[in-house]
């Protein structure tokens, strides 16, 4: 669950793109994975712009999940909410094949550091 001080921010089409969190005299934008979008507090309008620029398209990208044994597993994000993040294994693009029984991982929200974009 998101803390009560987190203010949901939606695009004009109603899609949630993150939250704006009061931080001192400014605000910190937080994306839909619960991760900060700015390193320092910013003004309200900048927080909105950063969230809208970030959007949700990055969720469709391939990610890596570091498993407890230290190996990295390619995954795709299938569901994101303030209750958790669900990813499925994606070896060789298998997550997009209809009828595939991909291994599923339920992660906490905010998403842990073990989940990161595949390009990093």
Image (spheres, helix red, strand yellow):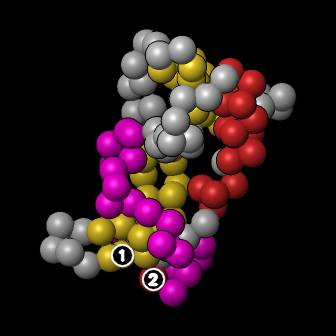
Q: How many marks?
A: 2
Q: Nearer the viewer, residue 94 or 51?
A: 51
Residue 114: x %, y % from top left: 32, 60
Magenta segment: 92-120
Marks 2/1 in contact by CB < 8 Å: the verdict is: yes
Quarter of image, res 108: top left
Can the viewer see residue 32 in this picture?
Answer: no
Q: Secondary structure at mark 1?
A: strand
Residue 63 part of the magenta segment: no
Q: Secondary structure at mark 2?
A: helix
The disc, 2 or 1, on the residue closer to the chain's N-terminal end is: 1
Residue 36: x %, y % from top left: 49, 40
Does residue 5 appear left or right of residue 29 in this picture?
left
Quarter of image, res 47: top right
- Residue drawn at x 51%, y 48% is 79
- Residue drawn at x 42%, y 24% is 2
Q: Which residue is mark 2?
A: 91
16 vs 114: above or below:
above
Does residue 71 appear left or right of residue 10 in this picture?
left
- Which numbered disc covers residue 73? 1
Q: Residues within 10 Å of mark 2 (few under 14, many from 20)?
A: few
Residue 103: x %, y % from top left: 35, 68
85 vs 5: above or below:
below
């Amino acid at each position: 669950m998101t803390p009560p001080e987190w203010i949901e921010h939606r695009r004009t089409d109603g899609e949630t793109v993150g939250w704006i969190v009061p931080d001192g005299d400014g605000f910190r934008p937080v994306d839909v994975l619960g991760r900060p979008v700015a390193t320092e507090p910013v003004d309200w309008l900048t927080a909105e712009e950063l969230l809208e620029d970030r959007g949700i398209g990055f969720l469709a990208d391939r990610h890596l999940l570091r498993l407890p044994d230290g190996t990295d597993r390619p995954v795709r994000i299938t569901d994101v909410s303030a209750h958790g993040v669900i990813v499925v294994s994606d070896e060789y693009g298998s997550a997009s094949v209809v009828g595939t029984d991909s291994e599923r991982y339920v992660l906490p929200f905010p998403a842990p550091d073990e989940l990161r974009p595949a390009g990093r």
